Amino acid sequence: MSYVFDVDGEVVWSPALRIGKLFISMAGTLADNSGTDLAAAGFTMMASDYYYVDPPRLAGFVRTLLAGAVDANPMYRELARGFLLTCLVLLERAGVVLEPDGEGQRELFDARAAHAALM
């Protein structure tokens, strides 16, 4: 079994069930920590293992995370790193390429291609 992450009818990622469940759980927790919800963060559940991704909302959510606790707290940044990399790849696959906001984000964005190869 696997999860499906879809953008406009195109599957942009289909991880194994446990990986998809972990990713969407992290999305929910990070959204909650940011004072929002999954839909506002760019993820709408179509079925328990199928999510529609809204690229503009997801891009805004990623920018919010990068400008907030991820930037302010080194431990939070490390814990959120894999989630953010996955989001950057999802966005790129959807045709939205974000660029770093300053040198502090450069390493994260530079790791995008290597992370995409794992997906």
Image (cartoon, rainbow, N blue to C red):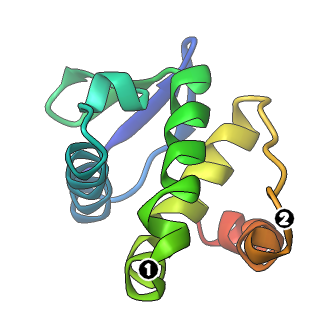
* 108 over 26 or under it: above or below: below
Q: In this view, does 14 lie to the left or right of 51?
A: right
Can you see residue 82? no
What x and y, as percent, mark residue 104? 75, 76
Which residue in the protein does label 1 denote? Answer: 73
Can you see residue 113? yes
Q: Distance between the residues labelled 2 and 1?
A: 16 Å
Is 20 or 79 nearer to us in this picture? 79
* 59 over 86 or under it: above or below: above
Is 3 or 28 nearer to us in this picture? 28
What x and y, as percent, mark residue 61? 49, 38
- Residue at image position (14%, 32%) is 48
- Residue at image position (57%, 12%) is 8
Q: Name the amino acid, label 1.
A: Asn
* 118 over 40 or under it: above or below: below
Which residue in the protein does label 2 denote? Answer: 102
**SS for tag 2?**
loop
Q: Earlier in the sequence, mark 2 or mark 1?
A: 1
**SS for tag 1?**
loop
